[in-house]
Each structure stands twice: as C-alpha cells, then as structure tokens.
Image (spheres, rainbow, N blue to C red):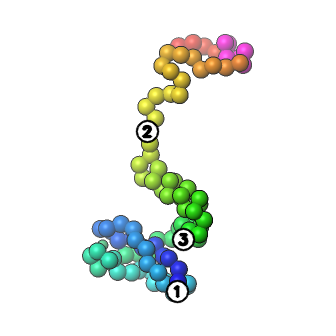
Amino acid sequence: MTVYDYRCPAHGDFEQRFPMGEAPAAARCGTCGGKASRVYGPTAVLSHDPLATKLLALQQSSAESPSVVTRSRTAAGRRAPTQDPRWRQLPRP
Ligand SMILES: [Zn+2]
C-alpha cells in the first residue's frame, strides 16, 4: 500500500492508502464526504526519510506563513563588523 495525498476544498489535505499505481484521481473526504482531488508532490516519495520529511514540512509551512524578520542581526545603530577596507569607502546615510 502507498500513501497518496488528496485535498478537499473545504477541509484541506488528507492521506489515503491505495495499492501502488491504483490511486484514483479523486477520493471522498473523510469529514464531509465531498470530492477531494489528488495532490501530486515529492512528500510521498521521500516519506521514508525522516529528515527529508521534516525539511519538506518546514518548507511547506514557511510557504504558507513565512516568519517575518523585524530587525537585523546587528544591534540597531551599530555598524556591521567587517575587515574589508573597501567598506570605509561606501557612502554613509
Ligand atoms: Zn471535506
């Protein structure tokens, strides 16, 4: 049996198991019984590797709601430390 992903327009993604190569293009949503379309992606192929699964989950979550950077890594008002002498030739604000 292989895990296939489906997406219900009302309830989101869910998984169902079918014999390899016999997954239908649509399945019934377990919540509403409506038609859910099959979703194609690398998740099912890489699901045996825990690290790959974790990275894919992280990638998908950041695509939906990326974390926002509110400040730079250096403290406010402090110049970034550099050893490159060309840095001093740059215009200042
Ligand atoms: Zn549904």
> Horizontal and vertical percent for residue 68?
43, 38
User: From mark 2 to mark 1, how far is it between C-alphas?
Assistant: 42 Å
Membership of 86 in magenta stretch? yes
Tell me which numbered mark, 3 or 1, is placed earlier along the sequence.
1
User: From mark 3 to mark 2, how far is it between C-alphas?
Assistant: 29 Å
Membership of 20 in magenta stretch? no
Q: Which residue is mark 1?
A: 19
Q: Quadrant of residue 49?
A: bottom right
Q: Residue at x 67, y 13 (%)?
A: 89
Q: Secondary structure at mark 1?
A: loop
> Horizontal and vertical percent for residue 85?
72, 15
> Horizontal and vertical percent for residue 20?
55, 84
Q: Which residue is mark 3?
A: 44
Which stretch did the figure color magenta? 84-89
Q: Secondary structure at mark 3?
A: helix
Q: Residue at x 57, y 62 (%)?
A: 50
> Is the magenta region chiefly helix, strand or loop?
helix
Ligand 1 is found in the corner quadrant, namely bottom left
Q: Residue at x 50, y 27 (%)?
A: 72
